[in-house]
Image: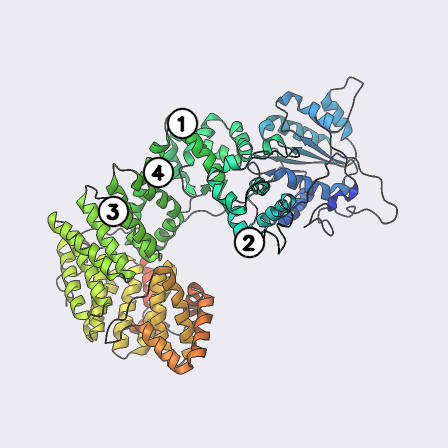
C-alpha cells in the first residue's frame, strides 16, 4: 500500500468554498492557537495538485455530518468525486484529531483477508512483538482522537464493515469516513449520497481544468467565452465530475464543438492518461465498468435491461419489462435494490404521480447498460416489451380520462413522456406493426391537447400516418386525432385533408365512430373559421351520431359544448345556455374536469353575448380555475383573453398584462387562431384593440410585456386567487344554483364522491337522451 506525504495543518485551505472561514465541524479545538506555528499533526492525506472546485454546499453538509456521527459513508456511482470530496473535508477538519487523519486507499486491494495489513501499512505502523495487525490497530487507536478514511470500500464491504465496527467499539476517539458505491451496513452509519454536480459547478470545473490544458480558456478574451456551449456539454455528460474533467482534457486536440459532436461515442472519447488518477478513474468506461464488476449476475442483467427506459420508471414497469430467463419476476426487486445500494440506479427523491417510487439511470450509465444488452442480443425483445407496456398505459389513461382522475392521468403521462417517446420511436422502426405507432399516437390525443403539446403530437401523428398500416380503424382514429391537432394549430388545410381522408376510410369500412369524430372536428373548424351556421349543422350531426352509438366520453360531451358555443356566436343565447347547462350537468355528474372547463367557457360566451358581464366573469374564472388545475395551456390562454375583454373597460392596463400572459400560452400551444369573422367573436383581438385605444401604443406594449415576463402560469395563479372570493356568489348565480355551491365546488364534490366510478355504456342518465333539451 503506497504512502502519501503528510500534509501540514494549512492543507485545509487548498480550495475555494466552505474551507474558507471557520469550520462548522471543527468545534472548540478546531483552529490552531495564535503564536508559534504548531507541529504538524500526524496523518498521510495527499496534497492535491489542482484546486478543489464546486461542491460547496455538499462539503459543508458533510463536515457537519462528520461532527454528528462517528461513521459516515459517501456513496455514489463511479466518477462522482467521492474520493476528492472526502479528502477535502478530511483536510478541513484534521486539526480536530490529535491522532491524525489517515487515508487508506483500497481500490487496488483484492484480497479482503489483507485489509488489516493494508490499514497498518497506510498508518506506517510496525510491530516487532509478533502482534496481529488487528491488535496493532487496537493499541494505536486506544487513546486520543483520529479520523480513518477508507476510500473505495464497495468490493470489500463485509471485511470493511467488520473492521470498522470492531475499531469503533474499542476506540472511543476514532471516527471513520468511508467512500464507496454502497454503504457498509454498520449500526450508526450515516449515508451521504453524492449525485451529479450542479450546472454552475460543472461549468466551473470544466473551465478550471480546461485552462490547465488550454491557457486562457476561461478568460473573457479566450476561447472559453461561450458559457452556453460549456453548459450544454456538461449537461450531456450528466454533470459527472470525472466525465467533465476527461472532456476538458480533450481540448488539447479538439475544439469544444468537436467534443460535443463526438459525445455519441463518449466511452471512446473520454479516456485519460493522467498519472495522478487512480487506474479506475483513467477512463469513464473503466470507472463505470468497476461498478459493473461488483454487481451480481442478476444485477448486471437487470442493469442491461433497464437501459431500454427513456427516462425514470416505476417498479411495476421494471418487473414487467425485465423479468424472464435468468431473472425471475420475484428477483427483480432484490436486484433493483442492489443496484440502488451500489449507486447504479438512482431512486428519485419524490414519488411518482401514481404514488410509486421512481428510479432512473444517468445517461452515461444507461449507455453502458445498452452496450451490454446489445452484446446479449436481447435489445429488440426488450424494446418491444417496453413499447407494449406503454401502449397499455396509454390505453388505460384514455379510458380513465372521462373521470375525476384527470389531474392524476395528466401528471402520469407528463412523467412518462420520455418513455412514451421511446415507444413511439420503436413503433416507427418496427415495420411489422406500423398500426401500433398510429394507435399510440392517436390514443394520446388528449395529452397532446391538454398539455399544450400540439406541435409534438402533430409530429408523431404525421410520422406514424406516413406508413399505410393494415388496420383501418386504428388509422382512422389517428387521422381524426391529427385533424383535431391541426385544427387547434390553425392549420386548416392539413386539418381538412386528414379529416376527409378519415371520412373516406370510415365510409369504406363502416366505421361509424370515426365518422362521428371527424364530423365533430369539421364542425369545430367551421366555428373557428367564423361560420357558426355550418358549425351548428355539423356539430348537431355529430351529436346525433354519438347518441345513436351510445358513446359517452369527453369528446362526445365536448361536441355539445362546441355546439353551445356555435349558438352563442350565432346570437341564439337561450339555446346556447340550455345546451351548455345540460353538458355541464353531465360533466359534474361524471367528475370530468377538462371538458367542464370548456362548458363553463362556452356558457361565459353565451352570458357575455346576452349582456350579463358579471355572470360571464364568474364563469370564466371558474373555467380558468379548472384549467389551471389540469395545466391546460391552450385553455388558460383562451380564458385569459376572454377575461381581458371583460376587464378592459375598468382596468385596461391589467387587461394588457393578461393578454401578454396569454401570448405565452399561444407560443407553447401553437399559432393563434384566425379571427372568427365579421361578427368579431375573437375576444383576444377585441381586448387588444380596446386596451391599445385606452392606453396608447407605448403604455399598452409595456403592460403586455410585463404579463409576458410574469408568464402564463404565474398570472393565472394570481388571477384565480385574487378573484376567487369576489366571484363566489356570481358563480352560484351563473349556474342557477343559488344559494348552493359554485360550479367549481360542485365539480370537486362530485369528483370526490364518484372517485371510483367508471363511465360505461347504458348509464342511468344517458347523455342527450329523449326528453333532454335538443337543438
Which residue ends up furthest to the right in the rendered image?
Answer: 36
Residue under label 4: 386
Q: Residue at x 75, y 43 (%)?
A: 11
Disc 4 and disc 3 in contact, CB within 8 angstroms: no
Which quadrant of the figure has residue 52? top right
Give the mark nearer the N terminus: 1 vs 4. Answer: 1
Residue under label 1: 376
Quick one: quadrant of the N terminus? Answer: top right
Give the mark nearer the N terminus: 4 vs 2. Answer: 2
Distance (Cα) linking label 2 and label 3:
40 Å
Q: Nearer the viewer, mark 2 or mark 1?
A: 2
Which residue ends up furthest to the top in the rendered image?
Answer: 130
Q: Is residue 237 visible?
A: no
Q: Nearer the viewer, residue 699 or 559?
A: 699
Distance (Cα) linking label 2 and label 1:
41 Å
Q: Nearer the viewer, mark 1 or mark 4?
A: 1
Q: Nearer the viewer, mark 2 or mark 3?
A: 2
Distance (Cα) linking label 1 and label 4:
17 Å
Q: Nearer the viewer, mark 1 or mark 3?
A: 3
Give the mark nearer the N terminus: 2 vs 1. Answer: 2
Give the mark nearer the N terminus: 2 vs 3. Answer: 2
Q: Nearer the viewer, mark 4 or mark 2?
A: 2
Check residue 226 in the rendering and tell me which mark sits there, or answer none. 2
- Local secondary structure at mark 4: helix
Amino acid at each position: 500500500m503506497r504512502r502519501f506525504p503528510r500534509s501540514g495543518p494549512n492543507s485545509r485551505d487548498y480550495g475555494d468554498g466552505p474551507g474558507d472561514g471557520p469550520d462548522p465541524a471543527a468545534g472548540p479545538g478546531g483552529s490552531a492557537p495564535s503564536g508559534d506555528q504548531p507541529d504538524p499533526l500526524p496523518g498521510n492525506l495527499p496534497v492535491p495538485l489542482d484546486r478543489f472546485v464546486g461542491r460547496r454546499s455538499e462539503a459543508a453538509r458533510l463536515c457537519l455530518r462528520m461532527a454528528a456521527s462517528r461513521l459516515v459513508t459517501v456513496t455514489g456511482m463511479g466518477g462522482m468525486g467521492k474520493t476528492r470530496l472526502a479528502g477535502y473535508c478530511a483536510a478541513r477538519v484534521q486539526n480536530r484529531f490529535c491522532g491524525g487523519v489517515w487515508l487508506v486507499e483500497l481500490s487496488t486491494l483484492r484480497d479482503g483477508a489483507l485489509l488489516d495489513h493494508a490499514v497498518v501499512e497506510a498508518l506506517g505502523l510496525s510491530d516487532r512483538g509478533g502482534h496481529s495487525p488487528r491488535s496493532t490497530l487496537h493499541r494505536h487507536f486506544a487513546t486520543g482522537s483520529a479520523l480513518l478514511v477508507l476510500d473505495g470500500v464497495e468490493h470489500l464491504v463485509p471485511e470493511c464493515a467488520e473492521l470498522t465496527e470492531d475499531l469503533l467499539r474499542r476506540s472511543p476517539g476514532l471516527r471513520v469516513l468511508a467512500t464507496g458505491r454502497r454503504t457498509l451496513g454498520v449500526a450508526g452509519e450515516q449515508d451521504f449520497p453524492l449525485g451529479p454536480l450542479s450546472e454552475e459547478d460543472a461549468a466551473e470545473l470544466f473551465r478550471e481544468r480546461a485552462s490547465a490544458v488550454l491557457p486562457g480558456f476561461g478568460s473573457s478574451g479566450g476561447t472559453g467565452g461561450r458559457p452556453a456551449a460549456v453548459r450544454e456539454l456538461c449537461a450531456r455528460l450528466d454533470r459527472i465530475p470525472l466525465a467533465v474533467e476527461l472532456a476538458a482534457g480533450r481540448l488539447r486536440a479538439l475544439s469544444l464543438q468537436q467534443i460535443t459532436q463526438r459525445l455519441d461515442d463518449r466511452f471512446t472519447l473520454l479516456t485519460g492518461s493522467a498519472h495522478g488518477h487512480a487506474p479506475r478513474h483513467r477512463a469513464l468506461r473503466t470507472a463505470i465498468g468497476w461498478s459493473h464488476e461488483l454487481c451480481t449476475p442478476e444485477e448486471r442483467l437487470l442493469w442491461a435491461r433497464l437501459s431500454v427506459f427513456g427516462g425514470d420508471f416505476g417498479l411495476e414497469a421494471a418487473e414487467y419489462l425485465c423479468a424472464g430467463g435468468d431473472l425471475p419476476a420475484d428477483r427483480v426487486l432484490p436486484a433493483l435494490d442492489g443496484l440502488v445500494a451500489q449507486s447504479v440506479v438512482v431512486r428519485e427523491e419524490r414519488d411518482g404521480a401514481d404514488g410509486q417510487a421512481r428510479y432512473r439511470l444517468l445517461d452515461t450509465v444507461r449507455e453502458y447498460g445498452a452496450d451490454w444488452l446489445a452484446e446479449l442480443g436481447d435489445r429488440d425483445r426488450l424494446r418491444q416489451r417496453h413499447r407494449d407496456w406503454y401502449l397499455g398505459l396509454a390505453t388505460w389513461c384514455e379510458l380513465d380520462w372521462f373521470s375525476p382522475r384527470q389531474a392524476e392521468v395528466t401528471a402520469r403521462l407528463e412523467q412518462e413522456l420520455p418513455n412514451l417517446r421511446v415507444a413511439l420511436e420503436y413503433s416507427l422502426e418496427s415495420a411489422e406493426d406500423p398500426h401500433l405507432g398510429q394507435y399510440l399516437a392517436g390514443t394520446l390525443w388528449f395529452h397532446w391537447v391538454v398539455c399544450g403539446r400540439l406541435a409534438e403530437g402533430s409530429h408523431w401523428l404525421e410520422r406514424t400516418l406516413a406508413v399505410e398500416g393494415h388496420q383501418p380503424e386504428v388509422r382512422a382514429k389517428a387521422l381524426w386525432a391529427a385533424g383535431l391537432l391541426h385544427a387547434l394549430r390553425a392549420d386548416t388545410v392539413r386539418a381538412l385533408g386528414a379529416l376527409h381522408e378519415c371520412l373516406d376510410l370510415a365510409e369504406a369500412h363502416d366505421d361509424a365512430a370515426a365518422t362521428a369524430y371527424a364530423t365533430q372536428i369539421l364542425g369545430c373548424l367551421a366555428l373557428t373559421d367564423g361560420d357558426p351556421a355550418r358549425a351548428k349543422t355539423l356539430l348537431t350531426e355529430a351529436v346525433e351520431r354519438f347518441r345513436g352509438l351510445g358513446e359517452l366520453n369527453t369528446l362526445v360531451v365536448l361536441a355539445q359544448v362546441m355546439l353551445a358555443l356555435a349558438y352563442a356566436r350565432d346570437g341564439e343565447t337561450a339555446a346556447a345556455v340550455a345546451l351548455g347547462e345540460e353538458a355541464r350537468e353531465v360533466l359534474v355528474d361524471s367528475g370530468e374536469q377538462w371538458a367542464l372547463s370548456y362548458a363553463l367557457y362556452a356558457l361565459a360566451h353565451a352570458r357575455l353575448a346576452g349582456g350579463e358581464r358579471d355572470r360571464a366573469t364568474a364563469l370564466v374564472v371558474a373555467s380558468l380555475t379548472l384549467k389551471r388545475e389540469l395545466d391546460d395551456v391552450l385553455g388558460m390562454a383562451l380564458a385569459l383573453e376572454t377575461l381581458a375583454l371583460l376587464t378592459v373597460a375598468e382596468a385596461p392596463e391589467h387587461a394588457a398584462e393578461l393578454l401578454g400572459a396569454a401570448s405565452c400560452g399561444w407560443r407553447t400551444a401553437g399559432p393563434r387562431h384566425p379571427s372568427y369573422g365579421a361578427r368579431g367573436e375573437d375576444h383576444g383581438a377585441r381586448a387588444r384593440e380596446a386596451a391599445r385605444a385606452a392606453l396608447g401604443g407605448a403604455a399598452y406594449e409595456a403592460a403586455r410585456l410585463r404579463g409576458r415576463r410574469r408568464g402564463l402560469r404565474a398570472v393565472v395563479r394570481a388571477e384565480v386567487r385574487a378573484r376567487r372570493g369576489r366571484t363566489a356568489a356570481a358563480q352560484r348565480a351563473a349556474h342557477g344554483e343559488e344559494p348552493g355551491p359554485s360550479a367549481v365546488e360542485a365539480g370537486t364534490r362530485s369528483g370526490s364522491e364518484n372517485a371510483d366510478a367508471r363511465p360505461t355504456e347504458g348509464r342511468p342518465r344517458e347523455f342527450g337522451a329523449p326528453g333532454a333539451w335538443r337543438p
